[in-house]
C-alpha cells in the first residue's frame, strides 16, 4: 500500500445518473447492444442518417452504384452508418474509414424472380466484420415468404442477442402488398415483436401511427429517386412524424450531387433544418 493514493472523490450527495438511454426501447439491453446502437444513433439527437447501398445484392450494378469506390466512398464521411452487403464492405470500403455498419445479413433471389430471402449469413462473419447491426427482411402478408422471413428475423435476433448485435427488421414491399399505414404499422410492429431493435419501413400518410406503435426506432427508406426538393420533404416529414432518421440510398447516390444531398439530408435529420432550408443548402453545396 506504500504510495497508494487513498480514494476520496466519492461524489457524496450527488445521485448516480440513471437517465434513460437515448434509443427507443433499448434501455434494458446489454452494454454491447447499447454501444452498437449508440454508434448508429447519434446520442445528441437520437437520430441517424444511414447510407444504404446494398441494392446490388438483388439488382446487380444499378445506376449510381456502378463503382462503389468512385460513387460511395466519397460519401461515407457524411453518413452516420453504412448499410451494405459483406461483399461490398470487404472489397470496396476502406476499413480505416471507421464507420458503423448495418450489414445486410440475408440473401435470396434477385429482382429477376420472386421476392425470397431464405438464407442468413453466418453470425461469425457478422462479428468478423465488426458490424454494428444486422439488416434482415421481413415480408408480412406474402403467403410464400412471410413464415420464412419471420423465421429468419427471429433467428437473427437470437444470434444477435447472443453476441450483443442488434437486428434491423426491413419491411418488404412485394408487388401485391398494400403500402399504407395499416400495413406498415403491422409489419413494423411484428419486426419489433420478433426481436428487432430497429425497423426500416416506408413513409406514408399516417406515418405517426407507425412510429408511435413501434416500440423501437423506425427509420425510413427513401424509395425510388425523387427530385431533391421532394426527397428532402420526405426526410423532414418523416422525422417530424416520429422517424428516428433515414436509411436512404437512391435519393442520395442517384442525385445530381450526391455529396451535397447527403449533407442536406443530414442537416434536416440532425440539425432541425426545414425541407426548404435543406434544399437551399443542397443548392448552395451543389453550386
Ligand atoms: C433494398 C433495401 C434498401 O437498402 C432500402 O430500400 C433503402 O434504399 P432506397 O432509399 O434506395 O429505397 O433495403 O432491399
Image: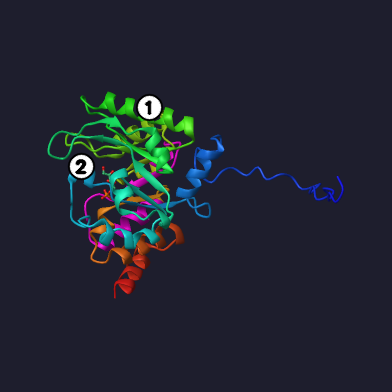
- From the viewer's perspective, tell me whether residue 237 is left or right of residue 270: left
List x then y, in percent, for residue 275: 35, 62
Instruction: Tell me which residue sits at (33%, 25%) in the image.
Output: 151
- From the viewer's perspective, tell me whether residue 148 is left or right of residue 47: left
Query: Which residue is outermost to the bottom?
Result: 287
Q: Quadrant of residue 131?
A: top left
Badge 2 is on which residue? 58
Residue 231 shown in magenta: yes
Q: Label 2's element?
A: helix
Instruction: Tell me which residue sits at (50%, 39%) in the image.
Output: 33
Q: Residues within 10 Å of mark 2 (few under 14, many from 20)?
A: some
- From the viewer's perspective, tell me whether residue 140 is left or right of residue 34: left
Pick the front one: 1 or 37:
1
Ligand 1 under 8 Å from disc 2 Cβ: yes
When the figure is inspected, residue 277 is found, relative to residue 189, above or below; the finding is below
Badge 1 is on which residue? 155
Cα–Cα gap, marks 2 and 1 = 22 Å
Query: Which residue is outermost to the right?
Result: 2
> Where the N terminus falls, by quadrant?
top right
Pick the front one: 255 or 92:
92
List x then y, in percent, for residue 257: 27, 66
- Nearer-N-terminus badge (2/1): 2
| Start-end of magenta stretch | 210-239
List x then y, in percent, for residue 69: 28, 59
Pick the front one: 94 or 208:
94
When the figure is inspected, residue 41 is found, relative to residue 183, above or below; the finding is below
Pick the front one: 44 or 129:
129
Instruction: Tell me which residue sits at (53%, 46%) in the image.
Output: 22
Amino acid at each position: 500500500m506504500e504510495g497508494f493514493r487513498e480514494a476520496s472523490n466519492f461524489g457524496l450527495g450527488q445521485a448516480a445518473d440513471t437517465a434513460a438511454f437515448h434509443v427507443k426501447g433499448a434501455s434494458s439491453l446489454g452494454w454491447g447492444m447499447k454501444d452498437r446502437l449508440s454508434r448508429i444513433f447519434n446520442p445528441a439527437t437520437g437520430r441517424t442518417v444511414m447510407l444504404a447501398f446494398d441494392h446490388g445484392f438483388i439488382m446487380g450494378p444499378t445506376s449510381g452504384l456502378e463503382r462503389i469506390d468512385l460513387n460511395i466512398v466519397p460519401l461515407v464521411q457524411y453518413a452516420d452508418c453504412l448499410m451494405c452487403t459483406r461483399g461490398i464492405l470487404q472489397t470496396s470500403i476502406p476499413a480505416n474509414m471507421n464507420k458503423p455498419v448495418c450489414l445486410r445479413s440475408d440473401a435470396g433471389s434477385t429482382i429477376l424472380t420472386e421476392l425470397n430471402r431464405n438464407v442468413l449469413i453466418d453470425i461469425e462473419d457478422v462479428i468478423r466484420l465488426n458490424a454494428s447491426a444486422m439488416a434482415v427482411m421481413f415480408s408480412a402478408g406474402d403467403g410464400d415468404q412471410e413464415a420464412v422471413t419471420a423465421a429468419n428475423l427471429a433467428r437473427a435476433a437470437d444470434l444477435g442477442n447472443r453476441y450483443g448485435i442488434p437486428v434491423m427488421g426491413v419491411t418488404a414491399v412485394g408487388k401485391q402488398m398494400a403500402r399504407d399505414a395499416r400495413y406498415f404499422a403491422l409489419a413494423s410492429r411484428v419486426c419489433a415483436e420478433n426481436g428487432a431493435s430497429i425497423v426500416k419501413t416506408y413513409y406514408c400518410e399516417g406515418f405517426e401511427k407507425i412510429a408511435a406503435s413501434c416500440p423501437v426506432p423506425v427509420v425510413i427508406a427513401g424509395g425510388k429517386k425523387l427530385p431533391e426538393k421532394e426527397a428532402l420533404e420526405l426526410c423532414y416529414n418523416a422525422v417530424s412524424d416520429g422517424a428516428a432518421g433515414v436509411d436512404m440510398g437512391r435519393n442520395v447516390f442517384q442525385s445530381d450531387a450526391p455529396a451535397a444531398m447527403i449533407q442536406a439530408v443530414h442537416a434536416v435529420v440532425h440539425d432541425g433544418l426545414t425541407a426548404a432550408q435543406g434544399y437551399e443548402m443542397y443548392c448552395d453545396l451543389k453550386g
